[in-house]
Image (cartoon, rainbow, N blue to C red):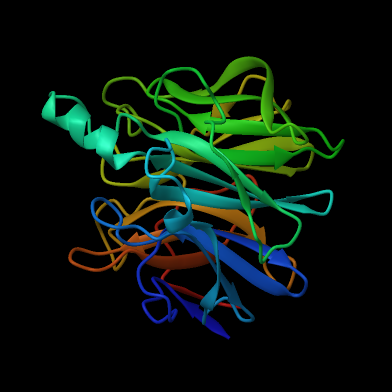
Amino acid sequence: MKITNPNFNTGIGAIRDPMIISYGGRYYMTGTSPQFWRGENPGVRIFVSDDLSHWEFFTLAVDSAKIASDAPCSDRFWAPELFIHSGRFYVTFNAMNEKEAEEREKSGGNFYGGMRSFIAVSDSIGGPYTVKPEPLVNSGILTNDAHLFADTDGRVYLFYATDFGIFARGFDIESLCVTGNAHLIVPKGKVGEWDSIGVEGSFVVKRGGRYYHWYSSWTRGYEMGCAVSDSVLGTYEKCAGNPVISSGGQGKIKYCGHNSCFTLPDGRDAVAYHGNGDGEPESLCIEPVVYPPVPHAPAEAFEM
C-alpha cells in the first residue's frame, strides 16, 4: 500500500503534532485537534487505524467538558502523547485556562503564557482517564510538549520544552512526579541558526545504544532536527546536518514539524509529523527513517 503525504483523506480532518503507537495489532494516534489557536477545543482525541492511512475516532481521553472551568488545564489541549508502561496508559498534554489567558492578554501579557504540561492515566487504552490537575513541572515558567520515555532498564524520564530549550529529568511513574535535577538537553540555537527562536516537540528513541532526541523549531516556518547522546541525561550533540526534515519552502509540503516515532508493520522505523502547504489544513505525514537520520525534504509518498 502507498502512503501519501500529506494525507488529506484520513477521515478525521486536520491534525497537528501527530503521535502514533502500535498496540494490540492496531495503530492508535493522538494529536492536537481543531480548534488549534482560539475557540472551543474538545480535549484529547484518540484515533485508531489498521492501515495507517484511514483513521476513525476511538475515544475522548481528556474531555474538556468534565474539567472544572477554573482548573489550570481547562482549555486548548495541545501536543498530546500516548505512553504505555507496565500495563497502564498515560496521556501527556499541554493545556491552559483561557479565562486567565484573556485577563493576561488584556494586561499586555502573552495569551499563551499560562501553557503547562499535564498528565492523565488509565487502566485501559480506551479509558476512562483520570486527569492530574497539577502541572507536571511546577517551575513557574511556561512548559510544553511533555514526552515520556522508558529506557531499557525500565526507568522513565520526562522531556519538556521551555523558553530556554528542552529539559529532561527523572519521572516517578507511580506518583506521576518528576524526580532529580533538570538537565538542559537541547538549547535553542544561536542567533542566525535554524532553531534560534525556540525548540519544542521532544521525542526520544534508543537505537544502537545511543539516544536520538527529535525536536522541532518554528524559527523559519517549521522544521525537525535531531540531537544524539550516549546517555539519556547526558550531553546531546545536535546533528551536523540539522534540520533533518525540512522543505525549505519547496515542494508539496511547505511546512512540516513536531514528529513522533514508531515502527511500521515490516519493522522499519518511521516518523509521523504534520505537514501542509499554503492554505491547506495541517495533515498527517508518515515516512520511514534510518538512524542516524539523514537530512532530506519531506517524502510525498512511500510504499508500505
Depicted 194 relative to depicted 34: above or below: above
Tally of marks: 0
Residue at the spot 44% in from the left edge and 67% down from the top edge: 284
Q: Residue at x 33, y 34 (%)?
A: 194
Question: Image quarter for residue 250?
Answer: bottom left
Q: Residue 181, percent across and down?
A: 65, 13
Name the outermost residue toward the right: 153
The residue positioned 44% from the left and 41% from the top of the image is 73
Relative depth, front residue between 294 and 45: 45
Vertical arrangement, residue 127 with respect to residue 160, above or below? below
Residue 246 lies, in percent from the top left, at 37, 50
Q: Residue at x 39, y 26 (%)?
A: 142
The one nearer the camera, 120 or 238, is 120
Q: Which of the 4 quarters of the picture holds residue 26?
A: bottom right
- Residue 275, by quadrant, is bottom left
Q: Is residue 246 left or right of residue 240?
A: left
Residue 279, given in percent of the width and then of the height, sits at: 18, 66
In percent of width and height, residue 46 lies at 55, 65
Residue 154 visible at all? yes
Against 16, residue 141 (above or below) is above
Is residue 269 at least partly visible in the picture? no
Residue that extends furthest to the bottom in the rendered view of this protein: 1
In the picture, the quarter occupied by the C terminus is bottom right
Q: Could you tell me which quadrant the N terminus lies in?
A: bottom right
